[in-house]
């Protein structure tokens, strides 16, 4: 993104795929992000609270993973 290589990547291995009618995918608008609800994907803070930092409040995690965290994604230098 923006000329930066990721520090970490997630590799997903598919073991089984169930093919469905392509018209159903079009009707469902699966590949159109503008149709997804705002809570379709949990925030970084929610994921951290559920998996990594269960003792911290969601408010604290949202502050930590907020704009200052995003600003550090692509450090200069």
Image (cartoon, rainbow, N blue to C red):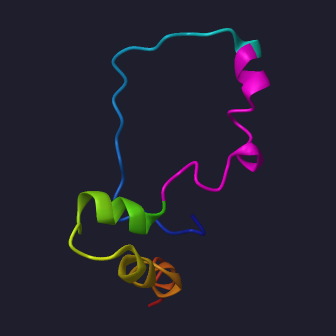
Q: Is residue 29 magenta?
A: yes
- Relative to residue 41, is residue 5 drawn left or right? left
In the rendered view, would you say 16 is above or below 75? above
Query: What residue is rendered at 37% in x and 77% in y?
Result: 61
Answer above or below: position of 23 versus 66.
Answer: above
State the extent of the magenta-drawn residues as a range.
24-42
Q: Give the side of residue 24 with respect to residue 63, left or right.
A: right
Residue located at (49% from left, 81% from top): 66
Q: Which image quadrant is residue 3 in?
A: bottom right
Residue shown at the point (56%, 10%) measured from the top left? 19
Name the quadrant of the C terminus: bottom left
Relative image position of residue 26 (x, y in whole percent): 77, 23
The quadrant of the image that shows the N terminus is bottom right
Q: Is residue 38 above or below residue 72?
A: above
Q: Please tell me which residue is depicted at 71% across the width and 14% down the height of the picture.
A: 22
- Image mark count: 0
Q: In x, y percent, where is residue 51?
A: 25, 57
Viewer-proximal residue, 42 or 25? 42
């Amino acid at each position: 993104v923006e000329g930066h290589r990721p520090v970490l990547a997630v590799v997903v291995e598919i073991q089984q795929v169930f093919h469905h009618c392509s018209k159903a995918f079009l009707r469902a608008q699966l590949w159109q992000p503008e149709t997804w609800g705002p809570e379709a994907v949990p925030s970084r803070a929610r994921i951290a609270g559920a998996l990594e930092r269960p003792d911290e409040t969601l408010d604290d995690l949202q502050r930590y993973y907020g704009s200052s965290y995003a600003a550090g994604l692509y450090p200069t230098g």
